[in-house]
Every structure is written in C-alpha cells, then in structure tokens.
Image (spheres, rainbow, N blue to C red):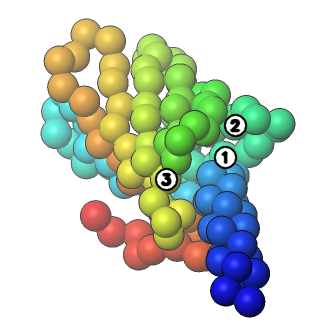
Amino acid sequence: MRTLILCLLVMALGLASTAADDVAGEYTGFGKQPYSGQRYACEVNITKTGDVYKILWSFEDEFGYDGVGIVKDGRLCVGYAAHVGYGVALYKIEADGVLDGVFGLPGFKETGSEKLYPEESNRAGGEASE
C-alpha cells in the first residue's frame, strides 16, 4: 500500500511539474527599465505551438514587443524585438504561475526586471502588484 501511495505521489508531482511549465495564457506585467529606472505596466499574451511559445507585449503608449521563447528547467527564455530594437529575457516560473524575470538590452550594463501575473480567467494567479 505504501508503495502504491508513493508511486501515485511521484506521478502527481511529475504531472504538476509538466503543467507548471506550460506558460500559455494572458498576463498583467509590471517592470522596471534598466536605463532609467522607470516603472511600467503591460499586458502580455503567450501562446504555445509545440514546444515553442509566442509572446506579445502591449503597452499603454501603443507600441509592443514580439518574442519567441522556450521553457527549460522551470524557466522561460525569450528573445524579442520591437521598433526600438531587440533584447533577451529570462523568467523563473513560480509555483503560482507568476513569471519572475530579468531582461537585457544591447548597449546597457544593467538588466531590467519584470513580473508577469497570470490573469484569473486562465490560471490561479497572484496579486498584480510588485
């Protein structure tokens, strides 16, 4: 009986890990620019095709970013582009579905930070505050 319970627990943990690695959905994001320290808010849409994710960021001033990402070892790695250039981001996938990330832009020594909070409609998420 103990063996059966242990096997079921291990299987459940494996399934939870796989589900947690699927980051597709709608997010509300908050971040801080590396070059100015300015804080910002954004809306993010992540869709999945096979093992590849498409990420779209929308900002209040009507510009956005378009990216592609992959998930590996509990992290989402993204390359992105916009009218202002390109960059790279790395997010840790938290147990509650929050994506806690840093990003880099060419020509800057520091990284920016960004947290993406899953919308309640598609995931169980945290409060949208930093």
Q: Which residue is mark 2?
A: 53
Who comes first in sequence, dot 2 or dot 1? 1
Q: Nearer the viewer, residue 94 or 26?
A: 94
**120 relative to 125 in the view: left or right:** right
Who comes first in sequence, dot 3 or dot 1? 1
Height in image: 126 above or below 107? below
Q: Which residue is mark 3?
A: 93
Does the rendering let one see residue 66?
A: no
Seen as rendered, the residue at the extreme bottom is: 1
Q: Secondary structure at mark 2?
A: strand
**37 relative to 47 in the view: left or right:** left
Task: Give how far apart the Cα atoms at labels 2 and 1 are.
Answer: 6 Å
Q: Which residue is mark 1?
A: 46
Seen at 33% across and 69% down, the residue is 129
Height in image: 19 above or below 72? below
Q: Residues within 10 Å of mark 2 (few under 14, many from 20)?
A: many
